[in-house]
Amino acid sequence: MSFEESIKGFILKLLDDEQIQQRLVSLSGEVQNVAQANKKEISDKQNRIAQLEDETRGKQDRIHQLEDETREKQDRISRLEKTVNDKQWRIGELEARVRDLENIQVNFSMFVEIDNIFQKYCSLPEEIQKSLDDLICRYSPVTFLLSGSANDNIPLLWGRIAKKVTEYSPEHIDILKEAFDLFFRYHSETYHTLERLHTEIGETYNVEKHDRTPDSSPSGQIVQVLLEGYQNTKTGKITKTIVRL
């Protein structure tokens, strides 16, 4: 008898054993129970997987919905930003136009003032105008302003007016003073070197700031300001105000 036949005979003998048969039956039941338990566990896991997949799809759908809402909001924000930018550009354009109009208005107002004083100056007696022709150009309001406010002409012009302040009529002196005030203001805004001295009626005479007219008292209070002086802010030099006591 071969080895394989011996093994086969041994196994058949075991299978004829009642206890072995009972044990096999028992193992078969246990295997079936384990198989059923495993099958149920697998089914439960499959169901859970299906549930999780459904939940995942739901969340993915919600994510897509939120992404769509985000894109819509971003598009709306972009449109609003464009609208704001357009309005800001429009506002900037309007502000620039307003500034241009204001400048035109200011320049026009200034030109009206210059022209008004120029016309008054041209109404002065010819001899007065000719005495100042080397300092003031009468060709136009612009040349009138530019020549009168020239850096070297301010002290010369003030000196000429000062010499005639008690000789010319008050009306003529007032026109010359008005012209000089215009020249001085324009000069100050251009060069920033001269500052006007302001004197009030009733103020006490101060020899360091005031020159009195020959017909004035030696001292006392000022009763008339004939021509205001000025000070050089760089050198400190004072051109005294002419007053009457």
Image (tube, helix red, strand yellow):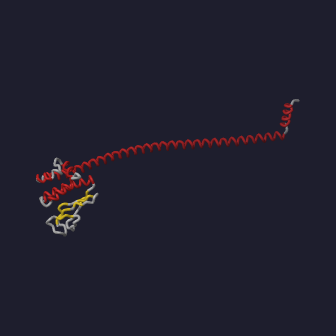
Q: If the image is split into quadrants, where does the C terminus sit?
A: bottom left
Q: If the image is split into quadrants, where does the N terminus sit?
A: top right
Spot occupied by residue 215 in the image (x, y as percentages of width and height)? 13, 66
Residue 50 higher or lower than 5, as above or below: below
Splitting the image into 4 quarters, where does residue 21 fall?
A: top right
Is 21 displayed left or right of 113 in the figure?
Answer: right
Spot occupied by residue 76 in the image (x, y as percentages of width and height)? 42, 44
* The residue positioned farthest toward the top in the image shown: 1
Q: Nearer the viewer, residue 103 or 133?
A: 133
Residue 2 higher or lower than 238, as above or below: above
Q: Is residue 111 visible?
A: no
Q: Is residue 148 visible?
A: yes
Q: Which residue lies at the image location 19% right of the left edge and 66% below the top edge?
A: 201
Residue 116 higher or lower than 239, as above or below: above
Q: Which residue lies at the image location 27% right of the left edge and 60% below the top edge?
A: 236
Is 31 displayed left or right of 238 in the figure?
Answer: right
Spot occupied by residue 93 in the image (x, y as percentages of width and height)? 32, 45
* The residue positioned farthest toward the right in the image shown: 1
Splitting the image into 4 quarters, where does residue 200 fall?
A: bottom left
Report the number of discs: 0
Q: Nearer the viewer, residue 142 or 10?
A: 142
Spot occupied by residue 124 in the image (x, y as percentages of width and height)? 12, 53
